[in-house]
Amino acid sequence: MSLLRRRFFWVHLLVLSSCGIKAQQSAPKFRVIAFFTGKNDKAHVSFVGEAVRWFPEVAKENNFAFDTTSNWSNMNASYLARYQVVVFLDTRPEKPEQREAFQKYMDNGGAWMGFHFAAFALTSSMYPQDWHWYHDTFLGSGQYKSNTWRPTSAILRVENRRHPATKQLPVTFQSSPNEWYCWEKDLKANKDIDVLLSIDPASFPLGTGPKVHEIWRSGYYPVVWTNKNYKMIYLNMGHNDIDYENKTNKELSFTLVNKVQNTIITEGLLWLGNTGK
């Protein structure tokens, strides 16, 4: 082989190797699809707007793919098969065939992350408790019971420091402002539920009212948890503060500007993606 041909051979080989390395680096570790409705309550719509801007940046930094859809008819087996993680940013699927597809996805090893309103169910509302598997078995929380008002920051306590989503968190930290939910069922008493974060007593009184029941003065309130039988994590965060009182609808707070709090979202998502289908 002549010197010129040998040089061409090695240059060609280096180019092919370089292309192979770049291809490996660019291939996402896993794929995430985030479902949202983005219509109910400006506070939830504000969070969805934040999320669809924030998650692509996190995806880029951590080499996973992030897509969004507001078309809940995409909740079907063929569409979900493209993704290792499903995210509910605000609501839940409502049609029987969509619910069946999601349950099968989770039963077959899929992974899920849900925020705030995704767990809401109240029989006398537009979102009744008419999905036993999701609210009672999967989430374990049952119906929504009450909430704090106005959206206020809380001190959150890490309940399980061994979980991959919480390992990098301090024992306690200050959250972003949020409307905190209380649930019908006692999650701490459920053997299938692993509570990761709860409201620290140092937060009390939590909420400003004006109604008395909107201010929590004591009690145990889980805010982030997993179900040991599924690859899932629920976070009660996701309700920004909006100026409803003065009717300006101005955004007064944001959820995803808190770097410490964001850690559990990022690490939780990486945990779900790396152990997905």
Image (spheres, helix red, strand yellow):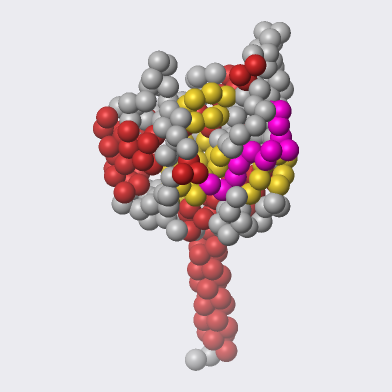
Query: Where is 121 relative to 60, above or below?
Result: above
Is residue 170 in sight in this rendering?
yes
Residue lying at the far bottom in this picture: please name it.
1
Q: Quadrant of residue 161?
A: bottom right
Question: Which of these two is toward me, 72 or 126?
Answer: 126
Query: Where is 213 relative to 270, above or below?
Result: above
Left/right of residue 16 with respect to residue 76 in the rendered view: right
Decide whether residue 170 is among the magenta residues. no
Count of all numbered marks drawn on residues in the image: 0
At x 40% / y 15%, what residue is drawn?
Answer: 124
**Percent x, y for residue 143?**
43, 28
**Percent x, y for residue 173?**
72, 44
Is residue 175 in sight in this rendering?
no
Q: Which residues are magenta?
A: 195-206
At x 50% / y 20%, what residue is drawn?
Answer: 39
Quadrant in the picture for the C terminus = bottom left
Question: Which of these two is toward me, 263 or 136?
Answer: 136
**Percent x, y for residue 127?**
40, 21
